[in-house]
Image (tube, rainbow, N blue to C red):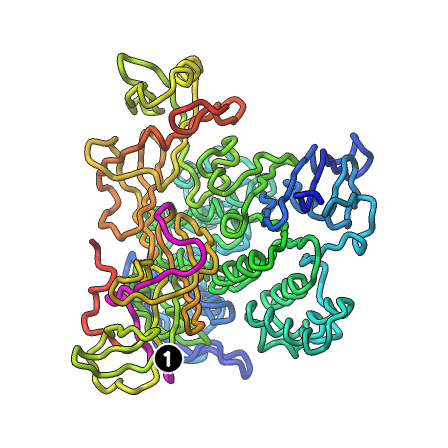
Amino acid sequence: MSAHMLEIRKVDKFYGPIDRGVHAVKDVSLSVKRGDIIALLGSSGCGKTSTLRMIAGFEEVSRGSISIAGREVHMLPPVKRNVAMAFEGYSLYPTVTVRDNIAFALKSSGKGAADIAQNVAEVAEMLEITDILDRYPMSISGGQQQRASLARALIRAADLYLLDEPMGQLEPQLRTLLRGRIKYYIKERGLTAILVTHDQTEANALADKIAVMEDGEMQQYASPEKIKEAPANLFTGTFVGEPPMNVFPAKAAVSDNALVFTLQDGSNLSFPRAAFADELQGHITGLDEITLGVRPYAVRRQVDGAFARVLANQWLGDQTHISAEFAGGELVLVEHDRVELAEGDAISVHLNAGDLHIFDPQTGRAISHGASLVA
Amino acid sequence: MSLTLNKISKSFKDDVVLDDLSLEVPTGKTLVLFGPSGAGKTVLLRLIAGVIEPDVGDIIIGGCNMEGVEPEDRGIGMAFQNFALFPHLSALDNIASPLAARRQDKSNIQSGVEKLARLLKIDHVLGHKPKELSNGQKQRTALARALAGEPRILLLDDPLRNVDAKLRFEMRLELPRLIKHQHATVIYVTQDYKEAMAFGDEIAVVNRGRIQQVGTPEDVYLSPANMDIAQLFGDPVINLLEVTPQMGPNGLHALVSDQPLALPTSDASIAGRSCVLGLRPEALHFVDAGAPGAIPVTVETETPLNEKTITLAMTARGREVMLSRPAGTPGPTTGPAHIAINHQVTLLFDAESQALIPSNDLGTAGKVA
């Protein structure tokens, strides 16, 4: 048996005639390990939902192939694919209660009534819908419908679980808790799940690997940590992460023992040359311009750093977000404690060479993360 | 201009939307109205704007009672979540519309609009019609229009609701400063607690037509008036555990998983009463098994959340708790572990009334380090 529960090979989706219609998904290949949670992440129109619908069988594959659990499925109808779905538009049956909607998914499983009732009770408790099990779908809120639909999908035995924006409508206070519970539920049972979301927070919270999509193309497919540490390009770097990565146009030059980045306002950020690989120095000093990126949490307030002036200091209870005027642009910092800073205050900020991401502004591609060139 | 609402009530047929509500916003300050949809926030804005009249009560702006004063004479600027721009006018003309209505001099209008547009970073799209603008640009245009009339009172009805996460973040950092520089008195409606904390000099938590608490972001987060409010602020949501306080030789304490925890009050009368302990996820942390007060738990899963790591864990008694720590700091990802509670930042509520039991030393918790 293949170690991969899902394999997407060189899949294209055209709406309209092949090669002439709208090219919604462009040559996407993706393998998903058994037991992994994968997020397809991107903004609307990026191709993530088309990809999910092709996996489910709601859309034809224009080119390429898809297999699930080692079976080629892209020519099979949805019911033959052995996938469980929580989709927008794949709605609850309005004429039966929430309980029966969820239990219905187990009817064909051969389980006894007592087992089914037990399973429904468990999943309902996990998703905080126990008190609405006997209500009808029309009489419950959007957030509750979403949870009921999620319960119906998760209770089934299937090769693959396809979840389309599963938590978009959830009450904000419940979201983080339910993310934790759902992740635990999926992991405990070793299920394999594909999640579509536009919300990078949700993707980071749940996924083992994130496929970042934009304009029909897969930009990067990697773990959340890897995407943070080594974003493949400027799009991925600035899309994943809240607060988003700080970016500045700069020009790199070498003087004596220092690698110096000259920023928009003419100010210089200077680092010891030893902190960067020789080939990296050679590459970036040969470019007219580079884009310098640094994550908000990597910016530290520290004496003898670069000058910045506070624009805003917002305490959010457990985290402080500071924005500051810096080198002709704006720099955002995150701290975990409260800090006493007001608009107009001067601060000294320190950037570590190891935290710098360098991008080619022409192509958007990452040139380096920290000390060394991207392979 | 200050804004005072004095004992306002408003019903639509039998539906009481606002019930004897009073509020005061000093000149140049921002008050955030925070609450779930249906709480009456939008009705309150419409009353202030003069679009509808209260059944009972007074609206006072700059010392003048607004009864019978037409909306256009109240000196109010407004921006809403649905942008509401004139589709046939350019961004510039949209922004200028309140000024044009006042028959201001054309070159004055032009320079005023350009200044605002630069501030809001839309100066490069002033010639565009609304349909050519991105959502963020539309939102900024609507805001510029609200500011253009140099209103004494600015009403903002969830203006960031329909913009994407990245822009919302950017605007959250940027907007309060822009607004402050206009010296207007602002009422800002939102359902997002982070916006409420970032924008509000004060936050009024509204629910079911009534104000449940008015206070600074510190007040609301560190001393929420009741359990509802404690759960509305903070992500992840506060952990709530049922406890029964006991009097011991070292004062009031409660047992949490058999470990005594000092309580934030010396009110002996609560001993034996049913209470609920509120523990912010950041007040819990992992410790070694032998540490004082260590509570055994089983770590179920870890979910990263915006530079924090959130852990879902279960105590031996089957109580689910969430812990939060800065991303990148070590902690167990699964299996058995021990946690401890920072007793200086706990909250205690009466289980029956759900009200906060006041702490001895208000202000200790969360103090600037």
* B120 relative to B23 in the view: left or right: right
Secondary element under disc 1, as helix, strand or loop, is loop
Report the number of numbered marks.
1
The image position of residue B27, as x and y in percent, is 28, 59
Q: Nearer the viewer, residue A93 or B138?
A: A93
Above or below, comparing residue A239 to residue A202 in the picture: above
Above or below, comparing residue A108 to residue A245 in the picture: below
Residue type (three-letter) at the residue carrying disc 1: Gln
Q: Which residue is mark 1?
A: B354
Q: Nearer the viewer, residue B6 or A36?
A: A36
First to last magenta residue range: B328-357
Q: Quadrant of the N terminus of chain B?
A: bottom left
The image position of residue A370, as x and y in percent, is 39, 28
Q: Is residue A55 visible?
A: yes
Q: In percent of the image, x 27 and y 67: which residue is there? A: B293
Q: In percent of the image, x 43 and y 22: which residue is there? A: A290
The image position of residue B135, as x and y in percent, is 54, 45
| Chain under disc 1 | B
Above or below, comparing residue A321 to residue B345 in the picture: above
Residue B25 lies in the magenta-colored region: no
Mark 1: give few (<14), some (14-19) or many (20+) Cα within 10 Å: some
Above or below, comparing residue B51 to residue A96 in the picture: above
The image position of residue A221, as x and y in percent, is 57, 37
Q: Report which quarter residue B219 is drawn in.
A: bottom left
Q: In percent of the image, x 79 and y 31: which residue is there? A: A20
Q: Is residue B103 visible?
A: no
* B321 relative to A37 in the view: left or right: left
Q: Report which quarter residue A309 is drawn in.
A: top left
